[in-house]
Amino acid sequence: MDNGLLYRHRAAMTSSTRKSNQLLRLIRASQPIMRTEIAARLSIDKSTVSEHVKPLIASGILREESYSEDGKRRARYLSFAANDLIFAGINLGVRRSQIGLTTLSGELSDEIEFETPAEAWKALSLAKQSLNELLAKQPNKTLAVIGVSVPGMADESRRKLVFAPNLGWKNVDIENAFAATGARVVVDNDSTAAAMYEARLKIRDSEDGLMTNFILVRSGTGIGVGLVIGSEVYRGTGAGRGVAGEFGHMTILAGGKPCVCGNRGCWEKYASASSASSLYLGDRPPRTGEKVPRFVEIVSKASVGDVRSRKTLEKIGEYLGIGIANVIMGVGIPRVVISGRLVYGWEFIEGPMRAAIGQSIVGKTQGWTVEAGEPAGSAIGGALELAVEGFLASL
Ligand SMILES: [Zn+2]
């Protein structure tokens, strides 16, 4: 799968600087955008902006179009061109997996979802099948990068899954599984992917978005944490690369519930969306034939006034707050974004969570914030982000 565009472009831009990476991320987040706005937001000259975008326009990655403002003035705006490159996102979830496609200009394909099989090879084979189905609807396009978000740790080269405790998968060569596509493969932790997705929204929505720092807490089947510093995800250093953010397994209750990681009382046993079912039952095993409600069902019950469901969500909120306060204290970043399935129960969780943070030393300081992120970021949105960011970083 040769692609002239890619090579022409690489030839045009030999050096990859942090500024040009920021410039591309800004254009992607805020497209269409004027050169003057890019210059102002990156604190660089307009001529420097032109220097960076010229080869990208020439190679067909970016385009610049004039739009009429108030019928008189015509301003020129930059955006990614609807070229022939396509990107795939695969989110391998503990319960369900999603697959979708996107372009640099931001068009999205349909999404295919399936229940994640217990064996990794079966899941990857289903993912490949779904990917081929989606690609068949996009003739004349070249698949550039496949982003794969996983509920566990990726290796340093971001090609393999090292360990996904909630799936029991170890050392899965994901890159190799998609070798036949000819596309580059980027594998990363799902919380990291969600953090990248939310970082793009911050770049789009705020003037200082490129300087943004926040902690992303993704709570679904487990809990994962992504750290965004200066709008970029922090991955750890040395042997710790890829391990940064494994706060889901910090002990929150000594001698507490056993966890898949081998420890007891881990945060994710008390504040993940999937911990709701157990809390709802009062931490006893279900009786024979007893139907145990899942997280979303507990949220619907709470919405119509079911006391037990409300109490369950309040308890989760409290545990969530205790963990968040610990993470803020450890990392020193007072802004937190919550992602994952837990967001659906936000109206019941938020109050007790804030009260629990308020009990901690960090809660007594000024300026900490916790907000709910967008549900898409924790699923297909994050996986697509990995693919497109992987491409932009290679330019
Ligand atoms: Zn654990």
Image (tube, rainbow, N blue to C red):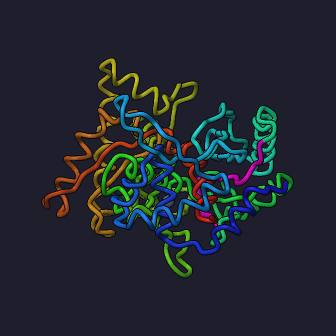
Q: Residue furthest bottom?
A: 238
Query: Which of the two residues, 280 or 157, is positioned nearer the viewer here?
Result: 157
> Picture coordinates of residue 300 (x, y %)?
40, 23
Q: Is residue 110 left or right of residue 324?
A: right
Q: Image check: 92 left or right of 4?
A: left
Give the percent coordinates (x, y) of residue 302. 34, 25
Is residue 147 located in the magenta-colored stretch of the structure?
yes
**Above or below, comparing residue 20 to residue 166 in the picture:** below
Q: Residue 125 colored magenta?
A: no
Q: Main secondary structure of the magenta part?
A: strand
> Residue 77's x, y, as percent?
47, 45
Question: Is residue 55 shown to the viewer in this render?
Answer: yes
| Rendering coords of residue 271 (x, y %) | 39, 47
Residue at point 72% right, 65% down? Answer: 171
Near-viewer residue (328 or 196): 196
Drawn side of residue 4 relative to residue 281, left or right: right
**Residue interval drawn in magenta:** 141-154
Q: Of residues 178 and 184, which is closer to you in this image?
A: 184
Quarter occupied by the N terminus: bottom right
